[in-house]
């Protein structure tokens, strides 16, 4: 299964299993991911929902560029970015449980945006992260909005405007990550440990705290970012840049 779930004692692990594609997401897999996240957020047996990629190389390399290359106007852009990838961001920010990004490998583009949208984030040392959307003629939805409140305006602006990928160690210093480990095994163990601490608290109080914290960091601004992402993807430049990159890659 491209998107699979493993339910442990305290955590519903949602795993993007497209390692041969860099754990990237096209429309269908994004819709499936969003549906699974929403389902696991209502699963009574677990206290926390955590997202990671399969393997140790990629958390997610974001949107499958083949999908961007095939966009032909506003309707295609709305379907891919609004319903598909936008639906994933909304599922994360709308989760009634704490949502943790377990960054097992490189997190690029929408992969990085999912980390920004999460309540907590832990990563393996040395993995690269960032949003090169401007290189493709697009605008990222979360790092342009709530990213400023997490990392600070100057740090978010550097990531968004340069499109540069930064090592997890640097993003930890910026405040995006809660902790760093040396391996995927340690990453899973750390998330389980944090989830156990959360599980020992009042379920009602945790849910209410999550709701208040998300409201206070103005997650509704993600809607502004998503509109910019959809509009920028609908422009012919985005598809042209994606096709050019894919042709050079071939």
Image (tube, rainbow, N blue to C red):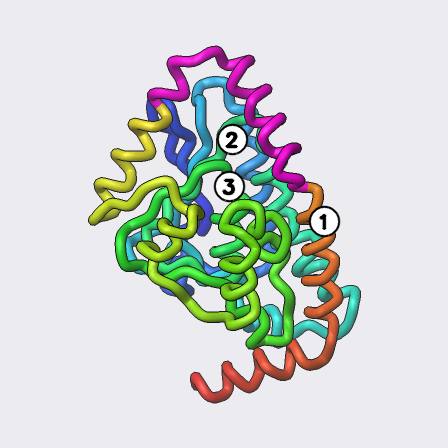
Q: Where does residue 88 sit, x and y in percent of width and height?
A: 59, 47
Residue in front for this viewpoint, 28 or 189? 189
Q: Upstream in the sequence, badge 1 or badge 2?
A: 2
Residue 97 left/right relative to 46: right
On-image quarter of the C terminus: bottom left
- Residue 98 versus residue 73: which sits nearer the camera? 98
> Which numbered dot is residue 223?
1
Mark 2 vs mark 3, foreground winner is 3
Give percent across and percent down for residue 67: 60, 69
Q: Nearer the viewer, residue 126 or 235?
A: 126
Q: Is residue 26 magenta?
A: no
For image coordinates 22% across by 40% down, the residue present is 186
Label 3 crowd bin: few (<14), some (14–19), many (20+), radius 10 Å: many
Where does label 3 land, which residue?
118
Percent of width and height locating residue 137? 63, 75
Q: Is residue 184 left or right of residue 28?
A: left
Q: Which residue is mark 2?
A: 40
Q: Measured from the top left, where is residue 169 in percent x and y?
A: 31, 55
For marks 1 and 2, give the one nearer the viewer. 1
Q: Residue at x 56, y 51 (%)?
A: 147
Number of numbered discs on residues? 3
Q: Magenta part of the protein: which range?
A: 196-219
């Amino acid at each position: 299964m491209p998107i699979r779930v493993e339910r442990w004692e305290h955590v519903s692990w949602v795993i993007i299993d497209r390692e041969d594609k860099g754990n990237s997401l096209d429309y269908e897999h994004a819709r499936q991911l969003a549906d699974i996240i929403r389902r696991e957020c209502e699963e009574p047996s677990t206290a926390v929902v955590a997202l990671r990629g399969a393997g140790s190389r990629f958390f997610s390399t974001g949107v499958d560029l083949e999908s961007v290359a095939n966009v032909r106007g506003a309707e295609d852009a709305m379907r891919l970015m609004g319903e598909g990838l936008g639906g994933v961001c909304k599922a994360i920010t709308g989760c009634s449980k704490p949502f943790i990004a377990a960054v097992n490998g490189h997190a690029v583009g929408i992969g990085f945006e999912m980390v920004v949208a999460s309540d907590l984030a832990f990563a393996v040392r040395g993995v690269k992260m960032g949003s090169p959307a401007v290189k493709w003629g697009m605008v990222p939805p979360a790092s342009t909005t709530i990213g400023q409140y997490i990392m600070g305006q100057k740090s978010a602006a550097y990531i968004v405007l340069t499109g540069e990928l930064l090592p997890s160690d640097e993003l930890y210093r910026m405040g995006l990550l809660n902790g760093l480990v040396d391996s995927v095994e340690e990453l899973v163990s750390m998330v389980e440990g944090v989830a156990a601490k959360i599980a020992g608290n009042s379920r009602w109080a945790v849910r209410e705290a999550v709701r208040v914290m998300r409201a206070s960091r103005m997650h509704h601004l993600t809607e502004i970012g998503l509109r910019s992402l959809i509009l920028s993807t609908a422009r012919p430049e985005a598809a042209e840049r994606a096709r050019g990159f894919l042709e050079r890659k071939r």
